[in-house]
Image (cartoon, grey):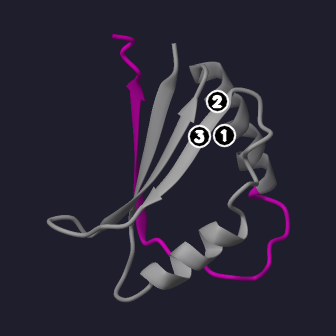
Amino acid sequence: MSIVVINALSIPGEAGPELEKRFAARKHSVDQEPGFEGFQLLRPVNGEDRYFVYTQWATRDDFENWRNKRSEAAHAPNDGKKPVASGADLMEFEVVEL
């Protein structure tokens, strides 16, 4: 059963364009991960001020494996840029097959 993981990112002030630029620069970086089914970055429009990062995975294990691998990479040297988000909330859902 597929799962959807949504990361709700709190973005300060006018930092939205920078966040979008950074996601665009690595748009296909997850495409080849086992079990990855899709990605969307959702910009707030009305009644919400957070960006939502929507990913879909074939299984929860696929997501967990990617997250663990990504966590290890987070400790490697980066490009020196500070994070854009000031907070994040992770939500997980199972896709209901109808």
Q: Which residue is mark 1?
A: 67
Which amino acid type corresponds to the residue marked 2 in the rendered image? Glu
Ranked by sequence position, the earlier of labels 3 and 2 is: 3
Asked whether residue 83 is in view, the answer is: no
Asked whether residue 39 is in view, the answer is: yes
- The spot of residue 63 in percent (x, y) is 62, 31
Which amino acid type corresponds to the residue marked 1 in the rendered image? Arg
CA distance separating discs 2 and 1: 5 Å
CA distance separating discs 3 and 2: 15 Å
As drawn, is 81 to the left or to the right of 5? right
Q: Nearer the viewer, residue 86 or 5?
A: 5
Q: Which picture quadrant has residue 91?
A: top left
Q: Which residue is mark 3?
A: 38
Q: Which region of the structure is painted magenta? A: 74-98
| Outermost residue toward the left in this view | 47
Q: Which residue is mark 2?
A: 64
Q: Residue at x 78, y 59 (%)?
A: 75
CA distance separating discs 1 and 3: 15 Å
Mark 3, Cα crowd under 10 Å, few <14 / some 14-19 / many 20+, is some
| Outermost residue toward the right in this view | 77
Q: Is residue 15 above or below residue 3?
A: below
Mark 1, Cα crowd under 10 Å, few <14 / some 14-19 / many 20+, is few
